Structure formats: C-alpha cells, structure tokens
C-alpha cells in the first residue's frame, strides 16, 4: 500500500490523537501549514505528524506554546527533521527538565520545613533565618529559589 504524501485534517487528528480543533489552533499559531486540495480541503504533510506529536509531548512537559513555536521554528517545514535536528531540540529540553527535577527535589525535601520566608515554620525561623536574613536577598521563598543570605543557616 502506497502512502499518500498528504493527510486530511481528520486523518492527521486520528494519527496523533488530537482533536481537529487543536490542529486548527496549531495551524493558526503557525506550527503547521496546510495546503488546499480538491474541494478546498486542508491537506497536511506527513512531516506534520512529528511536528504536532512534539507539540503534544512538549505541552505535557510544561513548555509554553511560545516555547514550542520557537523550537519548531528551528526545524524544516516541508520534510521530516533529521535525527541531528531532533537531538538538538532534545538536548535543550533535557536541560530544562533536569532543572525542573532539581527544583522539585529541593522543594520536596524542604516543603515541610523552613523555605526562607518563615510562613511554614515560625518555630524554626530563629534558628534557620534569624531576623529574617533571607529577606535581604529578595521576596518569596528564598531558600527554594537557591538564595542564601549572610548568616542564614541552611537546613
């Protein structure tokens, strides 16, 4: 069986597991571009399967639509990306995921204790953040953000 070079929007939706409206949204954002076939029907390149599959996975990883657009802008539009092109994108996303994992591990370890703002452990503030020294580096949960104020004893 010979594969057709293009897919209808319905075929593309079934192939990826996206709704037709989601594909239209991605098309409006410029992630994919349809040509028009007989009867003015949208036709998508087979390479769009990979582009939209990437968008679906990237959103599940927490990338914004703008970040997804930026990554896809580095790929060719009219053909499937090379292994090297995908690896380049994967390397950037892996770095982002590694940073998220580090932050989540740090948050997991400290969530029940002092996080540098005093809101969760007022009994310990005098020991770990005397005179609210963490506030000298800025507002918010300073310890989880990676800051250390002078004289603060990090747990």
Image (cartoon, rainbow, N blue to C red):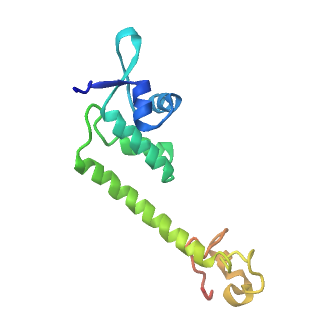
Question: Which sits in the foreground, 108 or 30?
Answer: 108
Quarter residue 79 falls in: top left
Q: Quadrant of the N terminus?
A: top left
Residue visible at 40% across and 27% down? 11
The vertical placement of 26 against 120, above or below, is above
Task: Describe residue 119's horizontal placement relative to residue 103 as left or right.
Answer: right
Q: Position of residue 76 (x, y in %)?
A: 28, 37
Q: Position of residue 36 (x, y in %)?
A: 36, 16
Q: In this view, which residue lies farthest toward the front?
A: 1
Question: Which sits in the foreground, 148 or 36?
Answer: 36
Task: Describe residue 56's horizontal placement relative to residue 114 as left or right.
Answer: left
Residue visible at 68% across and 84% down? 129
> Does residue 30 appear anywhere in the picture?
no
Residue visible at 42% across and 25% down? 9
Question: Which sits in the foreground, 40 or 121?
Answer: 40
The vertical placement of 114 against 6, above or below, is below
Residue visible at 50% across and 50% down? 60
Quarter residue 74 falls in: top left
Q: Position of residue 45 (x, y in %)?
A: 31, 28
Q: Quadrant of the C terminus?
A: bottom right
Q: How many numbered markers are drawn?
A: 0
Q: In this view, which residue lies farthest toward the right?
A: 123
Q: Position of residue 114 (x, y in %)?
A: 68, 80
The vertical placement of 151 against 11, above or below, is below
Quarter residue 96 falls in: bottom left
Task: Describe residue 137's horizontal placement relative to residue 25 as left or right.
Answer: right
> Does residue 33 appear anywhere in the picture?
yes
């Amino acid at each position: 069986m010979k594969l057709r070079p293009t897919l209808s929007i319905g075929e593309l939706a079934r192939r990826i597991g996206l709704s037709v409206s989601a594909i239209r949204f991605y098309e409006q954002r410029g992630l994919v571009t349809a040509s028009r076939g007989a009867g003015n029907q949208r036709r998508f390149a087979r390479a769009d399967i990979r582009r939209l599959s990437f968008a679906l996975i990237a959103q599940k990883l927490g990338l914004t639509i703008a970040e997804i657009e930026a990554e896809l802008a580095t790929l060719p539009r009219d053909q499937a990306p090379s292994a090297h092109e995908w690896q380049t994108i994967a390397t950037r996303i892996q770095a982002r995921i590694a940073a998220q994992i580090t932050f989540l591990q740090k948050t997991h370890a400290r969530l029940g204790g002092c996080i540098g703002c005093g809101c969760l452990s007022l009994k310990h503030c005098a020991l770990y953040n005397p005179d609210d020294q963490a506030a000298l580096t800025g507002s918010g949960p300073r310890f989880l953000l990676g800051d250390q104020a002078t004289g603060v004893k990090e747990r």
